Amino acid sequence: MSRLIAATVTVVVAAALAVGAALGIVALLEATPEQPNSPLITYEQAGQGD
């Protein structure tokens, strides 16, 4: 009987860890990264380079 209880507890703990990991991954994927507000490429306007 104690092996059955140990197996049941193991399954419940493993399921809880799997659900927690899945929720953590979803939370990380939904987090929006902070985006810089500076352009990577800038072009000089005509007449300003002189």
Image (cartoon, rainbow, N blue to C red):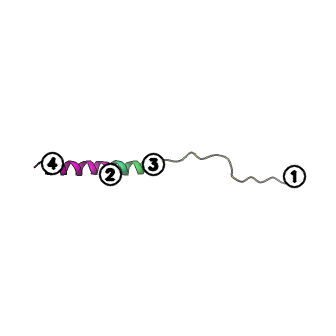
Percent from the top left, x then y, of residue 36?
62, 46
Q: What stretch of residues is rendered in magenta?
A: 1-19
- Single out the mark in the foreground, 1 or 3: 3
Mark 3 neighbour class, 10 Å CA radius: few under 14, some 14 to 19, many 20 or more: few
Residue with the mark numbered 4: 5
Element class at badge 4: helix
- Single out the mark in the foreground, 2 or 3: 2
CA gap between label 2 and label 1 equals 62 Å
Q: Are marks 2 and 3 in contact (CB under 8 Å)?
A: no
CA gap between label 1 and label 3 equals 47 Å
- Single out the mark in the foreground, 1 or 4: 4
Question: Which secondary structure type mostly characterizes the magenta part of the structure?
Answer: helix
Residue with the mark numbered 1: 47
Given the image, on which type of amino acid does mark 2 rest? Answer: Ala
Residue with the mark numbered 3: 28
Mark 4 neighbour class, 10 Å CA radius: few under 14, some 14 to 19, many 20 or more: few
Q: Is residue 49 left or right of residue 37?
A: right
For residue 18, the mark is 2
Report the residue that reaches farthest toward the front: 3
Whichever of labels 2 and 1 marks the residue nearer the N terminus, that label is: 2
Percent from the top left, x then y, of residue 12?
23, 49
